[in-house]
Image (tube, helix red, strand yellow):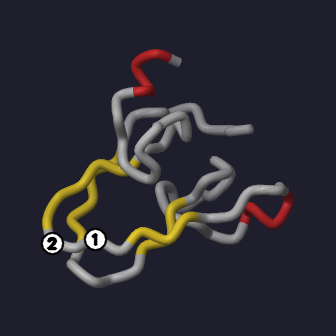
Amino acid sequence: MSELTNKQPIAINVEAGQEYWWCACGKSKTQPFCDGSHKETSLSPLKYTPMTSGMVWFCVCKQTGNQPLCDGSHSKT
């Protein structure tokens, strides 16, 4: 599925109410966000709209059970 070599989560300062489109396929060159590369797969990006502003850790390994946010799964892959 993923072509990623760096599977560490990425910290992003998000704004409440703003839409973010998380890459679910792992092919995006603009990780952790979608760049349209999923069109070659059966996967679709996931819309994330935070309720509050602040720092969040977006998953890059794509194994999280808390999409799109990191739950530590990268340390098990």
- Give the quarter of the image for residue 54: bottom left
Label 2: how many residues lie within 10 Å, few (<14), some (14-19) or many (20+)?
A: few
Q: Which residue is mark 1?
A: 50
At horizontal 74% and vertical 57% (from top left) the residue drawn is 43
Measured along the vertical axis of the image, is residue 33 above or below residue 49?
Answer: above
Badge 1: residue crowd in 10 Å (few <14, some 14–19, many ≥20): some
Residue 28 in the figure: left or right of residue 38: left
Residue 72 disc label: none
- Compared across the picture, whether 28 is left or right of 55 comes to right
Q: Quadrant of the N terminus?
A: top right
Q: Does 36 sit left or right of 24 as displayed?
A: right
Q: Amino acid at mark 1?
A: Pro
What secondary structure is found at the residue carrying circle 2? loop
Residue at 54% from the left image edge and 34% from the top image edge: 63
Q: Quadrant of residue 72?
A: top left
Residue type at the position of mark 2: Ser
Residue drawn at x 27%, y 59% as measured from the top left: 12
Asked whether disc 1 touches disc 2, contact meaning CB atoms under 8 Å apart, the reply is yes
Q: Position of residue 71 (x, y in %)?
A: 35, 35
- Residue plotted at (61% across, 38% down): 4
Query: What x and y, as percent, mark residue 44?
Result: 69, 63
Please give left or right for residue 72 compared with residue 64 in the image.
left
Badge 1 element: loop
Q: For this rendering, which residue is in front, 1 or 48?
A: 48
Instruction: Tell me where residue 60 appears, x and y as whole percent.
Output: 48, 43
Between the C-alphas of marks 1 and 2, the distance is 7 Å
Q: Residue furthest bottom?
A: 17
Farthest top residue in view = 76
Residue 57 in the image: x percent, y percent? Answer: 29, 48
Question: Count the marks: how many?
Answer: 2
Residue that mark 2 sits on: 53
